[in-house]
Image (spheres, grey):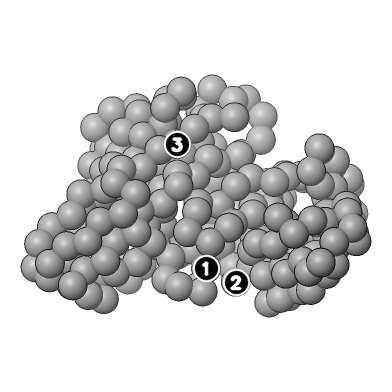
Amino acid sequence: GAVVSQHPSRVICKSGTSVKIECRSLDFQATTMFWYRQFPKKSLMLMATSNEGSKATYEQGVEKDKFLINHASLTLSTLTVTSAHPEDSSFYICSARDQTVASGNEQFFGPGTRLTVL
Amino acid sequence: LAKTTQPISMDSYEGQEVNITCSHNNIATNDYITWYQQFPSQGPRFIIQGYKTKVTNEVASLFIPADRKSSTLSLPRVSLSDTAVYYCLVGEDDTGFQKLVFGTGTRLLVSP
């Protein structure tokens, strides 16, 4: 199946700094990618929908100025956590759908990025 | 977006068949039903997807009644490595790219 990668897999940063997380579709093109956040023992929470060449669509309650999303190409979306604080510590996961697959709606998820803000 | 309800947790033993049922009473006509598996500190992995009746692949079966208000994921002969969280999802597809909203999931524990 299609592969989605994330980089870095783990990052530790100081409070107040910004962190960029990359999401890449390795063997397919994705005009739409999704960003999720997951706290320990909790379910995934959809943060935003990333659209190639246009602005991201954020879910209610997610600050667009805090979580900057850029989808500059058909294989790369980035999430930047600006001025990170300890409460932003979480597991961030992206997903993408192979737009060439005609049937079904399978989305492929990245392995996740563990962010720890000190 | 259709909301899903599934048991918080289930316990089983190796070799048994496990059936996890999900309720989605307000599923829309265009919605697919999709199940994902997630291990700790990993992204979810697609298991199976269906629209109606029965779907079977190499790892699971999905049973969907005619009214589509529920679905059952069936895992035959589970092993310890099937211990994971299983999510049932339905989602709107009006743009062609399904927006997935995860519910609480079912935490399956398989014991020896």
Residue lying furthest front in this view? B112
Q: CA distance from mark 3 to mark 2?
A: 24 Å
Q: Is residue B31 visible?
A: no
Question: Dot 2 lies on which element?
Answer: loop
Provide residue A46's location: percent of width, then percent of height.
43, 60
Q: CA distance from mark 1 to mark 3?
A: 20 Å
Q: CA distance from mark 2 to mark 1?
A: 5 Å
Q: Which residue is mark 1?
A: A43
Query: Is B65 above or below relative to B94?
Result: below
Q: Residues within 10 Å of mark 1 (few under 14, many from 20)?
A: some
Q: Earlier in the sequence, mark 1 or mark 3?
A: 3
Query: Is B75 above or below relative to B55?
Result: below
Is B4 on the left-hand or right-hand side of A75? Answer: right
Q: Which residue is mark 3?
A: A4
Q: Nearer the viewer, mark 3 or mark 2?
A: 3
Q: Are marks 2 and 1 in contact (CB under 8 Å)?
A: yes
Residue visible at 68% across and 77% down in the picture: B8
Quarter-wise, where is residue A19 in the image? bottom left
Quadrant placement of the N terminus of chain B: bottom right
Task: Determine which of the numbered discs, if any, sits on residue B104 in the image.
Answer: 2
The amino acid at mark 1 is: Ser
Front-lying residue, A92 or A98: A92
The amino acid at mark 2 is: Thr
Provide residue A118's location: percent of width, then percent of height.
18, 72
Quadrant placement of the C terminus of chain B: bottom right
Provide residue B77's location: percent of width, then percent of height.
88, 54
